[in-house]
Image: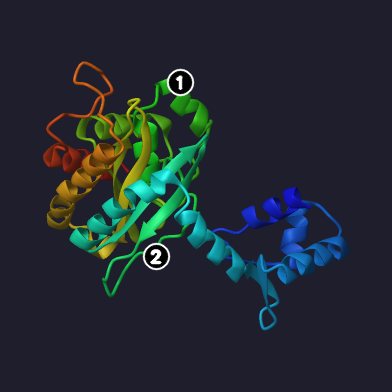
Amino acid sequence: MLATLNTVLALFSDRTPELAALEIAEHLGRPRSSVYRLLRTFEEAGFLDYDERTGRYRLGIRLAALGALAQQSSPLQRALHPVLIRLARDSGECATLVVRSGAVATTVDIVYAPQPLVVPGVLGGHPPLHASAAGKVLLAWLPDGERRALLGDTLTRYTAATISEAATLMDELDDVRATGIAIARGEWYSDVCGMGAPVWDHTGAAVGAVTIGFPSVRAGAARLRQLLPLVARAGAEGTGVLGGTPRTAADPLAPPLAGASSHRLLASDRRRRVRG
């Protein structure tokens, strides 16, 4: 039963926040009658909500409560939450902490900003590794062989701006390593941009990415230059909290010790968009 519950919950995402029973049955490959009984059980337990008007299911309010509790349960989340608060306050944008497990990136903490127009983050969401600022950060310092194994043979194209060629992505990851900052411009959602920096632990591993997400209308070059040092500082603060140190200058995969180079980063961003 628990395995089935996990499978059902995994079907919901920010792209598919609601599903009909028939759709769930098709995903599970089970008869509709047995799936209906399962969904009723999950609904009664509070894991799913059923909308009688639309005839569709969505994640239940109990999960929201559990998510809020889990948000405070991880040492990494507790340690870095103040960093996200400062980043959201100083940037005026939604700040997130994203970690990776295998080929899956997961948003484990969110702090919203007091902007009238914000990008809604999804706690527990899974930003794609190749099409999000957080994903690029989490890929950038991995060995090439490991990155290629995680990405697979094809890169899903979400928008016209998605990087769908591995060679182009690898070039961009080189720039992320050189600058210490990743930018994604409308690559997952066409009207959303993101910027992220790594957080290093005491072992020298990039254990997470601190990011901000903002609407494309606030993604002009001048605005990006304002945000770059804020994101870089948040990454450095998070690293300091964890007692970590970015890779040394002798390491070919290390970021520059002086921080991100906005000129190089924005230039590489322009080059990629021209090539695209």
Residue 142 visible in the shown view? yes
Apparent side of residue 123 relative to residue 256 in the rendered image (left or right): right
| Left or right: 88, with 148 as reference point | left
Q: Is residue 186 above or below residue 263?
A: below
Q: Earlier in the sequence, mark 2 or mark 1?
A: 2
Query: Which residue sits at x=30%, y=34%?
Result: 172
Find residue 175 and report its horizontal and vertical position in percent: 25, 32
How far, Cα to Cα, is label 2 from label 1? 34 Å
Out of 263 and 143, give the one closest to the viewer.
143
The residue at 74%/48% (across/down) is 3
Q: Give the image quarter of residue 90.
A: bottom left
Q: Nearer the viewer, mark 2 or mark 1?
A: 2
In the depicted structure, whether residue 119 falls above or below residue 185:
below
Question: Could you say where residue 9 lies in the image, as x and y percent from the top left?
Answer: 65, 57
Q: Position of residue 103 (x, y in %)?
A: 52, 36
- Percent coordinates x, y for residue 86 in the rendering: 23, 57
Q: Which residue is mark 1?
A: 145
Can residue 186 be seen from the camera position used here?
no
- What label does residue 120 carry, if any? 2
Q: Is residue 196 above or below residue 68?
A: above
Q: Residue at x 25, y 65 (%)?
A: 217
| Residue depicted at 21% across the width and 16% down the height | 250
Location of the C terminus (image quadrant): top left
